Amino acid sequence: MLPRSFGRPSVALLAAVCAALTLAPSAPPAAQLPRGSLRVLVPAYFYPLASSPWSRLNAAAAAHPQRVAAIGNPGSGPGSAFDSSYSAAFAGFRASGGLLLGYVHSSYGARPAAAVKADMTQWRAWYPLDGFFIDEMDNLAGAHEAYYRDLFLHARSLVPRGIVVGNPGVSTPQSYLFWNNQRVVSALCIQESSSSFLAWQSDSWVKALPRRNFYALPYAVGASTWPSVVDHAYAENCGWIYTTDDVLPNPWDTLPSYFEALVSYVDASY
C-alpha cells in the first residue's frame, strides 16, 4: 500500500510504486492448482536404488509440468540420519518439476507435537521440500484441531506457502480443514481404501469448497478400473488423486503398472 502522507503523493513516487507492483512476482499459493484442476500425489515409499521407481516419477514430472507431487519417506519421517541417496532422488525429482512433501506421522493426535515438529525441522535441515504430509491424522470433532493447527503453523514457518496435506483417510469434519476461521491443513485426504471406491461419496461440505482442498488415495485398483476411479474422484470434488494396483501390507512401495497412463490421463482430461 502507499505510505501514509498528509500531502498529495508526488508523480515520481507514484511512478516508483507502479513500477514495483509491475515487477513484483504474483505466484499463487502452492496448495492451489495453477494448471488444470487435478494433480497426482504419489506416496513414494521406496528406496532410491538405481532401478527404483524414482526415475519413472522424474520422467512423469518432466513430461507433465505442475501435475505430479510425491511424498518422500526415508523412515516414517526423515529417518535417523541424512541419506545421500534420498538427497539425490529428492533433488532430481524437484529438478524435473515435481513437488516434494516430507512424511511425518501424528498417531491420531497422541504423538507429542514437539516430536512431530522436530521431524519437520529435521526434514528441512536435510532435504529440499515443498511441504509436508501429516499421516495418521485424527478426525474426531473437537479433539485435536488446535494440535494440527499448531503443526500447520510450524510447517509453514519452515516452508513458507508450502503444501501441508493431512491424512485421516476417511470422512472428516470440516474443522480439520478450517478451525476458528483458520487453516488447519492445505488439503485433507478423505478417502484411503482398497474397496468400493466407486460407491464412495464425499460429504456435502466437501462439495461446497474448492477441490484443491481434497485428496483421494484408493489402492488395489486394477488396470481396467483406474480411469473410472480417477473420474469418480474428480466427480466427488477431489483435486488430488493417486491410485495403484499395489496391495497391503504396503501399497506404496512401488508404482502401478499404469502409472504413466494415469498421469497422462489426468493431464489430458482435467
Image (spheres, grey):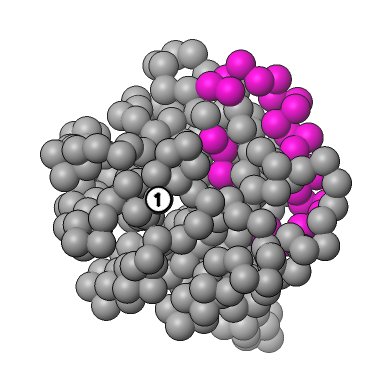
Residue 122 within the segment the image draws in magenta = yes
**94 shown above or below 143:** below
**183 shown above or below 221:** above
x, y percent for residue 164:
55, 46
> What residue sits 52% from the left and 79% below the top?
59
**Is residue 89 in sight in this rendering?**
yes
> What residue sits 40% from the left and 16% below the top?
141
> Hey, which residue is sitting farthest top in the picture?
143
> What residue sits 82% from the left and 56% below the top?
83
Q: Is residue 48 left or right of residue 137?
A: right
**Span of residues in magenta:** 107-135
- Crowdedness of circle 1 by 10 Å Cα count: few (<14), some, many (20+)? some
> What residue sits 36% from the left and 38% below the top?
192
x, y percent for residue 269:
23, 73
Q: How many numbered badges does the structure rendering display?
A: 1
Q: Is residue 62 left or right of residue 262?
A: right
SS class, disc 1:
loop
x, y percent for residue 84:
82, 62
**Is residue 145 in sight in this rendering?**
no
| Residue at the disc numbered 1 | 246
Q: Nearer the viewer, residue 140 or 159?
A: 140
Residue 168 within the segment the image draws in magenta = no
Image quadrant where residue 234 sits:
bottom left
Q: Is residue 167 left or right of residue 6?
A: left
